[in-house]
Image: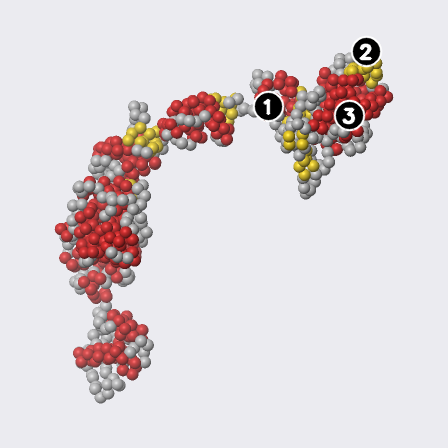
């Protein structure tokens, strides 16, 4: 049937049997396009799209069939039936032409908006060649006056050469390009509309009616823009008060409300509504000149600027009479980018600029001469760099000066330079005069000197050069140097860098090495004599007092703490001559008390060259040994021994009682004899005395001290730790139980009881 002929029967409006010879009646896409372009209400359009699929099904609709459809009320049913009847009266239902056919025609506004860049819907079967020539799709991007960012992003990332290629990209694809934002998207959209409508392109910012905006000052700019966006005079003044203030903080909603007689909530509502008007597409274009010049102000100084320096840069660019308040400007800028705030003066703002990736500034900083000047001011360097770049810039960009932020970034990236406040100086000079980290300062001093220095010299140098440490004491510097791992001791009080690989041993280490080499405990004088020239006597004596490292076993003899605990009596006995070893076995044998051991120790220690000692002197020193232990709070003897009652019995009585048994044993052993010469004396027999030279005599003494130490260590009661302050005995050295030592015979899981002993005439002291 010819499509111009229509068969229509009005016998029954409820049962329509009309037949239309329309092509593609069963094409769902054509029906969808037909409904979308029908001009029906939103509800009627949705009812048809959700329940009808083809033109053929649409022709068969009746009031009864429509009324049962979801969301189809009486009003919607009448609208669709009237629309269908109107089509029947026209004689035919015209099927819409395809999208491909539309783009073969000259562009109109509806066709332009169907391009993927505007509709965000891809057209996979259409190429630039399929577009009508009036779309100007073959125009090359390089022939269009685009911004630097937009052009290079489309050319390099999008791999697009013509404007037609861009027309057929969706806005989503464009925004996915790196550094291609909404500003660039809006720019390219305006270009395409202009090309399609007029066949020519004029940059959008040149078409702005600038006379509507007053750029003579920041205040006039805010005032004119608020007048453009807002109708209410009150609202204009209110919003101006939020962007025009002189303090570091914006006025509060409460303060603005009091000024205009409004509540804080009402001010907030007006402010939010005004901001929406400010950011409306119809209004925002009025500020294009401001944004162009904002980027220009930043780019003219290198493409990066501190927020605090932006007002002055805008003043110079717009030729304003005065710079705006930085915080007021920041309040205004923050409304355009969601989540952005400009509160810190050192916040950085950037703009597109080739200087940020240029190598020319690096060459400039390499050529700086610090031999005549210790430092350069940032402003001076900005001007000099501007002159340098005018001569050397590969893009021929002329910059009179550079922003401080740009100089800071260059200095930060340049190894060997430091920015201190507004001064640029070498890192060595900064370490010497401005650094606040003591470890780095000391490292610099030593590196400059080239060899170890005494800590007093280091402290004196730092006090003179660095004002931050003008009150630094020698003691504080010495304490810091010891604490840091960057330094090693080179000599007493002299330090160098650890990286120098210095080999130095402390006095304690030297003593330990000497004791290990000898293999036996040594007298203090022997240690001093061996280390003479390397350490002084006082330092050696002080080091021997470290109880964690050394053990004073008595009579001025010292051993390493851990080594002494591991030594046994038998290893010392093996070092003695046979007769002397038998003598030791005699008095170290089975003993119920320490009397024989202590008396043997006192005898060997105090006998004269003939091996004799006055009996009275022997008894007195014997008594003083136990008295010394008693005064120190150490274990004196077992509970059953007489000496345990040293604080109860008379001195002479306890001496006679305690010394009688060991003396009888000595005289009956065959190793001692008694004779009278200027008083009674006890003498060692020749069988023991003759083999004893000085070295053997020291070994014998050490052996006896080990036996004494073992006895009292075993005697100390469990679960008790005796702690005392050191006190020298009156007439005799301690037996190897050094003052201040701890005796612990406590299982690990048992609690430890600490005992405090009240000392006569000295008050209560912690032992």
Q: Position of residue 589 (x, y in %)?
A: 81, 28
Q: Is residue 444 left or right of residue 619?
A: left
Estimate the spatial distance between the alpha carbons at disc 1 and disc 3, rounded to whole Å.
39 Å
Please state which of the two labelled residues, at mark 2 or mark 3, is closer to the viewer.
3
Q: Position of residue 138 (x, y in %)?
A: 20, 55
Q: Which mark is residue 542?
A: 1
For this rendering, which residue is in front, 669 or 387? 669
Residue 189 visible in rendering: no
Q: Quadrant of residue 551?
A: top right
Q: Is residue 230 left or right of residue 731?
A: left
Q: Which residue is mark 2?
A: 677
Count all numbered tags in the image, as a single digit.
3
Q: Quadrant of residue 445?
A: top left
Q: Quadrant of the N terminus?
A: bottom left
Q: Is residue 741 left or right of residue 39?
A: right
For this rendering, which residue is in front, 253 or 566? 253
Q: Which residue is mark 3?
A: 650
Disc 2 secondary structure class = loop
Name the colouring of the figure.
secondary structure
For this rendering, which residue is in front, 611 or 173? 611
Q: Residue at x 79, y 22 (%)?
A: 652
């Amino acid at each position: 049937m010819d499509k111009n002929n229509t068969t229509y029967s009005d016998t029954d409006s409820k049962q329509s049997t009309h037949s239309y010879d329309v092509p593609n009646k069963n094409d769902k896409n054509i029906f969808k396009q037909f409904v979308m372009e029908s001009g029906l209400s939103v509800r009627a359009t949705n009812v048809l799209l959700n329940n009808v699929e083809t033109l053929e099904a649409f022709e068969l609709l009746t009031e009864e069939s429509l009324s049962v459809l979801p969301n189809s009320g009486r009003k919607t049913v009448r609208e669709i039936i009237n629309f269908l009847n109107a089509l029947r009266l026209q004689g035919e239902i015209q099927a819409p032409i395809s999208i491909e056919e539309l783009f073969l025609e000259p562009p109109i506004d509806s066709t332009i908006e169907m391009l993927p860049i505007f509709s965000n819907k891809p057209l996979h079967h259409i190429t630039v060649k399929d577009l009508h020539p009036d779309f100007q799709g073959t125009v090359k991007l390089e022939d269009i006056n685009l911004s630097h960012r937009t052009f290079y992003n489309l050319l390099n990332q999008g791999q697009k050469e013509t404007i037609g290629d861009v027309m057929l990209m969706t806005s989503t694809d464009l925004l996915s390009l790196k550094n291609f934002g909404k500003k660039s998207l809006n720019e390219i959209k305006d270009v395409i509309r202009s090309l399609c409508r007029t066949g020519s392109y004029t940059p959008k910012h040149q078409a702005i009616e600038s006379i509507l905006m007053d750029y003579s000052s920041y205040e006039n700019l805010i005032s004119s823009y608020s007048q453009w966006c807002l109708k209410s005079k009150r609202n204009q003044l209110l919003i101006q008060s939020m962007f025009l203030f002189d303090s570091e903080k914006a006025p509060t909603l409460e303060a603005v409300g009091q000024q205009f007689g409004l509540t804080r909530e009402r001010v907030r509502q007006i402010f939010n509504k005004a901001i929406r008007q400010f950011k409306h597409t119809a209004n925002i274009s009025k500020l294009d000149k401001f944004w162009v010049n904002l980027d220009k102000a930043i780019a003219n100084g290198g493409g990066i600027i501190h927020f605090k320096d932006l007002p002055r840069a805008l003043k110079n660019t717009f030729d304003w009479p005065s710079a705006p308040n930085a915080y007021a400007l920041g309040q205004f800028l923050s409304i355009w980018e969601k989540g952005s705030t400009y509160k810190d003066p050192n916040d950085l703002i950037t703009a597109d600029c080739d200087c940020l990736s240029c190598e020319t500034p690096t060459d400039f900083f390499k050529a700086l001469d610090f031999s005549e000047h210790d430092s350069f001011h940032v402003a001076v360097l900005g001007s000099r760099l501007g002159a340098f770049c005018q001569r050397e810039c590969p893009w021929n960009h002329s910059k009179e000066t550079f922003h401080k932020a740009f100089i800071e970034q260059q200095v930060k990236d340049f190894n060997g330079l430091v920015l201190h406040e507004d001064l640029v100086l070498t890192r060595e000079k900064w370490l010497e005069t401005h650094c606040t980290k003591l470890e780095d300062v000391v490292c610099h001093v030593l590196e400059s000197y080239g060899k170890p220095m005494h800590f007093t010299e280091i402290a004196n140098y730092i006090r003179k050069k660095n004002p931050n440490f003008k009150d630094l004491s020698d003691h504080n510097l010495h304490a810091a140097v010891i604490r840091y791992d960057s330094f090693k001791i080179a000599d007493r009080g002299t330090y160098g860098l650890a990286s120098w690989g210095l080999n130095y041993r402390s006095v304690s280490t030297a003593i330990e090495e000497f004791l290990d080499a000898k293999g036996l405990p040594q007298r203090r004088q022997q240690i001093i004599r061996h280390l003479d020239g390397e350490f002084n006597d006082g330092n050696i004596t002080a080091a021997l007092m470290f109880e964690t490292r050394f053990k004073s076993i008595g009579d001025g003899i010292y051993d390493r703490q851990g080594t002494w605990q591991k030594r046994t009596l038998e290893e010392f006995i093996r070092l003695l001559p046979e007769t002397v070893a038998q003598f030791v076995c005699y008095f170290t044998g089975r003993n119920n008390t320490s009397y024989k051991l202590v008396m043997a120790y006192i005898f060997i220690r105090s006998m004269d060259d003939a091996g004799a000692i006055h009996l009275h002197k022997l008894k007195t020193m014997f008594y003083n040994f136990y008295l010394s232990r008693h005064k120190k709070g150490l274990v004196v003897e077992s509970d059953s021994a007489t000496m345990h009652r040293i604080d109860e019995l008379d001195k002479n009585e306890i001496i006679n009682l305690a010394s009688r048994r060991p003396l009888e044993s000595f005289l009956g052993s065959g190793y001692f004899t008694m004779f009278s010469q200027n008083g009674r004396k006890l003498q060692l027999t020749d069988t023991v005395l003759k083999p004893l030279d000085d070295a053997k005599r020291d070994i014998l003494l050490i052996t006896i001290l080990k036996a004494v130490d073992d006895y009292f260590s075993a005697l100390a009661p469990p679960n008790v730790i005796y702690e005392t302050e050191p006190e020298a005995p009156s007439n005799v050295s301690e037996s190897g139980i050094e003052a201040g030592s701890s005796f612990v015979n406590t299982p690990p899981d048992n609690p430890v009881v600490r005992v405090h002993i009240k000392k006569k005439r000295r008050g209560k002291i912690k032992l």
